[in-house]
Amino acid sequence: MARNTNPVCKICKSQGEKLFLKGERCYTPKCAVDRSRDSSRRSSGPVGAPRRRRRLSDHGIQLKQKQKARHIYGIYERQFRGMFDEAARQSGVTGSNLLKLLERRLDNVIYRAGFATSRPQARQTVNHGHIQVNGRKVDVPSFIVKPGDVISWREKSKSSGLYQTANDNVGRRRQASNWITVDSENLTAAIDAVPNEDDVDTTIDTRMITEYYSRR
């Protein structure tokens, strides 16, 4: 399945929660999810009342969680399944392993460090060759970082608009947690450890994703 090309606000509305796919807009009153909730509160009576949704089956709930994870991290279905299979081969809990792999993607680290306002922008930053890991250019968003890695901007990229955006954003919307140390002045990020589930602020139920793939 290809990446969803529909308006990202529709994805959030279908999930019934903010997935923060549109950067700064998600923090403003223009957020479609907030406006939808306000509209529902104002609706009254049988004419204005929102339609009652059908109750999802167990499979439907599992699929919804899998799709939510895909949309949050911006991953194709085939690539997501490959990451799940890799997580299943590792020791420990498969769902926890999957979440750790997703968090350690280079584009996600760029977002967590505050070098981009959204993961799509972070993916663009990596794709355009602006980022280096341990002094070497890496233009693959799915690159998995490991403890000890240092992420920085290429010198020639410091005149780009994306770098200026990162410089303005790093102190405002930084999503970094205990496993990343960010140097806001030099715009570098050091990977201190493998993230734990407690370090992740998403509401993904990885158990449901495991059950979804287990029955296929």
Image (cartoon, rainbow, N blue to C red):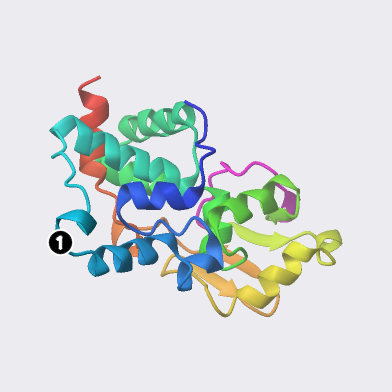
The image shows residue 143 at horizontal and vertical percentages of 58, 43
- Residue at 26 percent of width and 69 percent of height: 42
The image shows residue 131 at horizontal and vertical percentages of 71, 55
Q: Which residue is mark 1?
A: 45
Rendered position, 34 above or below 132: below
| Front residue (pair 27, 210) | 27
- Residue at 70 percent of width and 69 percent of height: 165
Rendered position, 138 above or below 203: above
| Front residue (pair 44, 176) | 44
- Image quadrant for the C terminus? top left
The image shows residue 89 at horizontal and vertical percentages of 33, 29
Outermost residue on the top side: it is 216
Outermost residue on the front side: it is 47
- Look at the image and give the residue range highlighted in magenta: 135-147
- Residue at 47 percent of width and 66 percent of height: 26
Q: Is residue 178 visible?
A: yes
State yes or no: residue 141 in magenta.
yes
Rendered position, 181 above or below 110: below
State yes or no: residue 31 in magenta.
no
- At label 1, the amino acid type is Gly
Q: Main secondary structure of the magenta part?
A: loop
